[in-house]
Amino acid sequence: MNNRLSPATNLPLNASMTCDLGSDFDEQFFILNFGTRLLTAFTDKEILTDIALETLADFSRGTRVAVMCLDDKQENLDVAGIFLESKSVHPNISFPVEETLTGKMMLQKVVAICPLVMENDIPLPAENGRPGDNQCLCLPLIGASFHVVGLATIEIPETHHLTFFEMQQLRILSTVLAVALDNARLFARVIHDSLTNLYTRRFYEIRVEEELLKLKRNHGCLSLILFDLDNFKKVNDMFGHLAGDEVLRQFAALMQDNVRRGSTLVSRYGGEEFVLLMPDAHLSEAIHLAQRITTLCSSHTFGDGPGKIQMTVSGGVAFTDHTESLSPKELFQRADTALYDAKNNGKNRIVAWHDQAASPGGPVCV
């Protein structure tokens, strides 16, 4: 029996589509079990998306796969990733939900095969197609409480006829992916500061403890920079708290634009204080970064209103390696001591902590 479905037809659960159950079923079930466990093991959205794209491509034997997530306003589908030519890419592309077939396929919450149209290498459903063309499998990503979080689309070659068993696998994977994406979104909200989108103090405290434990095992090193915006209270007093919030947002963006993504952790410690945690970074590297950010801050015009706000920042730098056994509190205290000295010596400067017992004289201005 030909199980190729007509365009935009909802996929039936037809017993005649079932595949032969046996060793192949056991093998596929094992792979499916591994895939679902892998999807639930990560809370980083990009890593999760990459795993999902490859897993969906493997199980569908599709040539191109896209995962799209509904934005917070539920107005657009943001493309989280595309799998093509055996690699994942993450374009900055969105599609409106309203008045588009892509949005309609998601909101229907029903798995369907449609004619295919390609847009920026993204497989999308189309209203009309030609016989013999590849088709688009639409998998709504439905999580807890039947809540839709996005849509996965897969380019299915015209020569490939999806079996009932393959469709069941894809249904399970799409459900697991939806729950995992929802969990990743909630986790991101918990660990990110709502104003600056930097990591929270609590997440920093977890990470610094982990990094200090790694030092002994890996014979590594760890640097920490503690920044404090100078005279920030005057900004709130003179320009208002909304202007102060904008200064914090822009300084956060300035830091993020100048650190190594994926290695340096940038956190808002509290108020106008920020912490940069730099695994495997020597003191000289941390000092260089701190000085660059200080220079950029002093030359940047803050605010988005008519008033121009000029800011400076002071910083304290601390360092440790595998030869020491510092606690998170002790490492932070080093940076805090250096920051205190920077504040008391004119501000708008970087001070590095050093061991006073080995070299008396306190922190060192750099």
Image: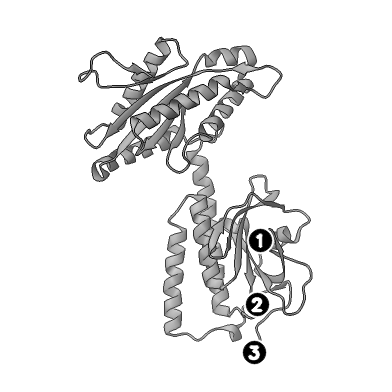
Mark 3 residue element: loop
Query: Which residue does the numbered mark 3 point to in the structure image?
Result: 1
Mark in front: 1 vs 3: 1
Tags 1 and 2 in contact by the CB under 8 Å rule? no
Residue 209 position in % (x across, y down): 32, 37
* Dot 1 crowding, Cα within 10 Å, few <14, some 14–19, many 20+: many
Q: Nearer the viewer, residue 310 or 125?
A: 310
- Which image quarter: residue 214? top left
Residue occupying image coordinates x 35% and y 32%: 223
Dot label at residue 325: none
| Residue 23 appears left or right of 221 | right
* Image position of 352 with respect to 123: above or below: above
| Residue 358 appears left or right of 362 | left
Dot label at residue 122: 1
Query: Which residue does the numbered mark 2 point to in the structure image?
Result: 12
Instruction: Measure the C-alpha gap from mark 3 to mark 2.
Output: 14 Å
Mark 1 residue element: strand
Badge 3 amino acid: Met
Badge 2 amino acid: Pro
Residue 112 position in % (x across, y down): 67, 70
Residue 205 position in % (x across, y down): 38, 35
Instruction: Measure the C-alpha gap from mark 1 to mark 2.
Output: 26 Å
Residue occupying image coordinates x 34% and y 30%: 283
